[in-house]
Amino acid sequence: MNQREKVVEIRDLKKAFGDLEVLKGVDLDLFKEENLVVLGKSGSGKSVLIKIMVGLLTQDSGSMKVFGQEVSRLKKRDLNALRLKIGFSFQNSALYDSMTVRENMEFPLVRNEKNLTRAEISRRIEELLDSVGLPQTINQMPSELSGGQKKRIGVARTLILNPEIMLYDEPTAGLDPITCGDINNLILEVRERYKTSSIVITHDLTCAKQTGDRMAVLLDGQFDALGTFEEVFPNAEDDRIKSFYDYNFINS
């Protein structure tokens, strides 16, 4: 893993909504082929950070560079091209209920890559379903899938455009412990197979420990802890960070 090549570089990023300061000057790097876990309480600004990264929100000040480009300065065409390099795996999988798995997988592909033949589309869908271990679901409806299967299909659909950065939003939320382990393994397999760089937003410290090369804890609008799991947990002296560990491993 090349730890020196930065794919995301955030410097002194600030964002407020009226009198509410959400991001108070954050600094963060994501390196090539790194899995970076971002932890923080609800409302701490994790989703705001991601929205600025893909140009859905604009910062008040500071810099957000993705692949060396300042996102806030990109023209619409260039911003759309950047977004195709970033895959977002939603918490609820975001599958269309009225479409089969095949149709769900096809949708972003035919929308963004106009020159593919039917055979090429089918081959890519089958390859990705196989890579997440669910080739047999291709003609099923989302209502016929388990929660863990929906998560896997959601990841496969995100990968269909060959993104260089993966954003995972609470990938293990609402899943049983065994399925959580399967999803954590999938995140590692995706990085290994597709050479992605990833940001994993989670409250699940088992997920964080298993998938993350580094942890970044967002507290009161700033990253107050940054390092490996062992460097950040479990011996944190900051009570705000310690509470994450206690909630996951002591009080549960």
Image (spheres, rainbow, N blue to C red):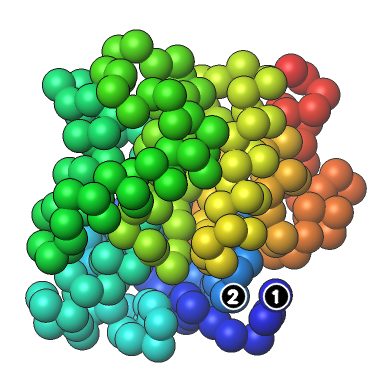
Rendered view: 247 above or below 126:
above
- The N terminus sits in image quarter: bottom right
- Amino acid tagged 1: Met
- Amino acid tagged 2: Phe
Tell me if label 1 and label 2 are in contact, CB under 8 Å.
yes
User: What residue is pinned by disc 2?
Assistant: 31
Picture coordinates of residue 32, whole percent (x, y): 57, 75
SS label for mark 2: strand
- Residue 246 located left or right of residue 21: right
Residue ID at (17%, 49%): 118
Binning the other alpha carbons within 10 Å of mark 2 as few (below 14), some (14 to 19) or many (20 upward) gives some
Residue 182, quarter of picture: top right
Residue ID at (39%, 78%): 66
Q: Can residue 169 be seen in this view?
A: no
Q: Can residue 11 be seen in this view?
A: yes
Whole-angstrom CA distance, mark 1 to mark 2, is 9 Å
Rendered view: 18 above or below 201:
below
- Residue 220 located left or right of residue 77: right
Binning the other alpha carbons within 10 Å of mark 1 as few (below 14), some (14 to 19) or many (20 upward) gives few
Is residue 135 or residue 186 the one in the foreground?
135
Give the residue furthest to the top.
144
Give the residue furthest to the front.
119
Picture coordinates of residue 173, whole percent (x, y): 52, 27
Residue 60, quarter of picture: bottom left
Residue ID at (62%, 23%): 179
User: What residue is pinned by disc 1?
Assistant: 1
